[in-house]
Image: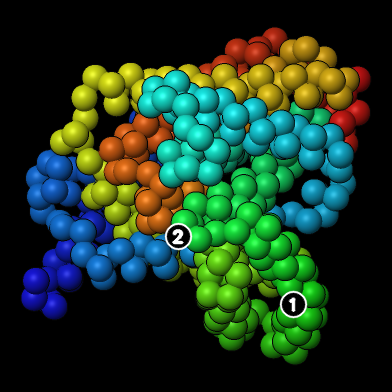
């Protein structure tokens, strides 16, 4: 492939991703779904306009790093601390139940695997994909209905943030265990050491960035330094601790989320992600999705994957919310609100593909889950909230 052909590929990817992203948005589906479909259409499985190259793979990796960095920057530490134990319990259930159900789903289709085997970690990884919650669709729906600031809306938002943090930790541990020469004790130790290092370094860099931000407020050097910090922590996580690079990027965002210009950094990151790296990443999912090997068994697995993904979140999060003294209807709203999947599920799936824990044909199941959950969640929430009086803004967990 000639070097300049990459410009042709980028032109096709960006134009088609944005076109189908707009179409998806008009159809009330997440824009990323359109970008993934665009990648599928222009890829080898359908039209064959674009081939996956090492350059595009590296650009997609930068895209996922920027997405996770932005997710960290948008984390509200004060909100997490305010909602406290209730959101944490709901988030833990929202990770544990789908993780177990997804693992048994894979084993149900492909047979039980002995502990520590390659197939065992593939099964656990399928469960790991189901742990992620993308709350953006739910947040927008609750905002339109004027319910976002109520105790249910606040709980969903906080639990989803904690859910993603726990999900990333689970991903980190599973990938660490997958390595043939991995030592379970070493994997856990490296994970703990990384987060200890992140806390120590976090305090140091937080005060350093706050000082620079105070001296040079709202200047471009702040997001530039932030981006360098993101890449550095991603490298350190992967190189020295065997932790997924996306974990380092997310932690970098969390460290900087409380400085005064965090929104300014996120805004600048969003420009890069929205215009170039984001479309390349999501289109690359479509490029890698292999429909040539699609058969009845894979299709049945995809349908069951969607059903398990939706039901496990409703049961896990809803049941714990009920135990935390939310009314039955409110507990159901929390379970429904937590069942949407989006970018993080794709990022986890992408990481699994890169380390050999998943094959491209299963991307179809992940994409289907995102589409179904994104369409079903707003509809069901509107039905549950129908004819109810407006909620006052309350602290999550009052549940009375």
Query: In the shown orientation, is residue 268 left or right of residue 79?
Result: left
Query: Is disc 2 placed on a helix, strand or loop?
Result: helix
Does 367 sit above or below residue 82? above
Q: Position of residue 223 (x, y in %)?
A: 58, 77
Q: Do tag 1 and tag 2 residues touch (Cβ < 8 Å)?
A: no
Q: Position of residue 140 (x, y in %)?
A: 58, 36
Does 246 sit above or below residue 164? below
Quarter of the view holding residue 227: bottom right
Closer to us: 381 or 181: 181
Does 101 sit above or below residue 114? above
Q: Quadrant of the N terminus?
A: bottom left
Instruction: Name the residue located 10 percent from the left edge and 50 percent from the top edge.
Output: 48
Q: Which mark is residue 64?
A: 2
Query: In the shown orientation, is residue 154 left or right of residue 54?
Result: right
Query: In the shown orientation, is residue 145 left or right of residue 326?
Result: left
- Mark 1 vs 2, N-terminal side: 2
Q: Marks 1/2: CA distance?
A: 23 Å
In the rendered image, the residue lying farthest to the bottom is: 215
Closer to us: 309 or 169: 169
Quarter of the view holding residue 312: top right
Instruction: Name the residue located 84 percent from the left edge and 28 percent from the top edge.
Output: 392
Instruction: Name the residue located 43 percent from the left edge and 39 percent from the top edge.
Output: 119
The tally of labels here is 2
Does 391 sit above or below residue 47? above
Query: Is disc 1 placed on a helix, strand or loop?
Result: helix
Quarter of the view holding residue 313: top right
Tell me, yes or no, if residue 261 can be seen here.
Answer: yes
Residue under label 1: 201
User: Pointer 1: residues within 10 angstroms few (<14), some, or many (20+)?
Assistant: some
User: Pointer 2: residues within 10 angstroms few (<14), some, or many (20+)?
Assistant: many
């Amino acid at each position: 492939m000639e070097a300049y052909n990459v410009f042709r590929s980028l032109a096709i990817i960006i134009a088609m991703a944005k076109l189908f992203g707009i179409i998806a948005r008009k159809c009330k589906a997440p824009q990323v779904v359109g970008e993934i479909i665009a990648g599928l259409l222009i890829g080898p499985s359908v039209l064959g306009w674009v081939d996956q190259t090492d350059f595009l793979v590296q650009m997609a990796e930068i895209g996922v790093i920027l997405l996770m960095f932005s997710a960290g920057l948008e984390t509200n530490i004060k909100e997490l601390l305010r909602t406290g134990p209730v959101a944490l319990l709901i988030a833990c259930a929202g990770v544990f139940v789908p993780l177990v159900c997804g693992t048994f789903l894979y084993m149900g289709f492909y047979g039980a695997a002995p502990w520590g085997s390659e197939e065992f970690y593939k099964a656990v990884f399928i469960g790991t994909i189901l742990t992620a919650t993308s709350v953006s669709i739910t947040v927008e729906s609750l905002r339109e209905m004027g319910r976002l600031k109520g105790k249910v809306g606040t709980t969903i938002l906080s639990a989803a943030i904690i859910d993603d943090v726990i999900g990333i930790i689970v991903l980190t541990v599973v990938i660490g265990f997958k390595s043939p020469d991995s030592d379970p004790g070493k994997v856990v130790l490296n994970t703990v050491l990384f987060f200890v290092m992140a806390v120590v370094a976090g305090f140091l860099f937080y005060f350093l960035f706050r000082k620079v931000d105070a001296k040079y407020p709202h200047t471009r050097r702040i997001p530039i330094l932030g981006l360098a910090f993101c890449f550095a922590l991603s490298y350190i996580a992967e190189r020295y601790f065997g932790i997924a690079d996306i974990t380092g990027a997310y932690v970098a965002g969390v460290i900087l989320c409380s400085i005064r210009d965090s929104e300014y950094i996120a805004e600048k990151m969003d420009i890069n992600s929205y215009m170039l790296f984001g479309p390349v990443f999501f289109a690359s999912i479509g490029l890698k999705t292999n429909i040539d090997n699609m058969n009845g068994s894979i299709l049945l697995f995809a349908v069951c994957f969607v059903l398990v993904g939706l039901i496990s979140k409703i049961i896990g999060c809803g049941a714990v919310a009920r135990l935390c003294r939310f009314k039955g209807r409110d507990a159901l709203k929390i379970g429904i609100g937590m069942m949407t999947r989006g970018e993080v599920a794709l990022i986890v799936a992408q990481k699994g593909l890169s380390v050999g824990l998943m094959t491209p044909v299963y991307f179809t199941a992940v994409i289907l889950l995102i589409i179904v959950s994104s369409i079903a969640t707003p509809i069901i929430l509107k039905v549950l909230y129908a004819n109810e009086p407006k909620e006052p803004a309350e602290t999550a967990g009052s549940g009375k």
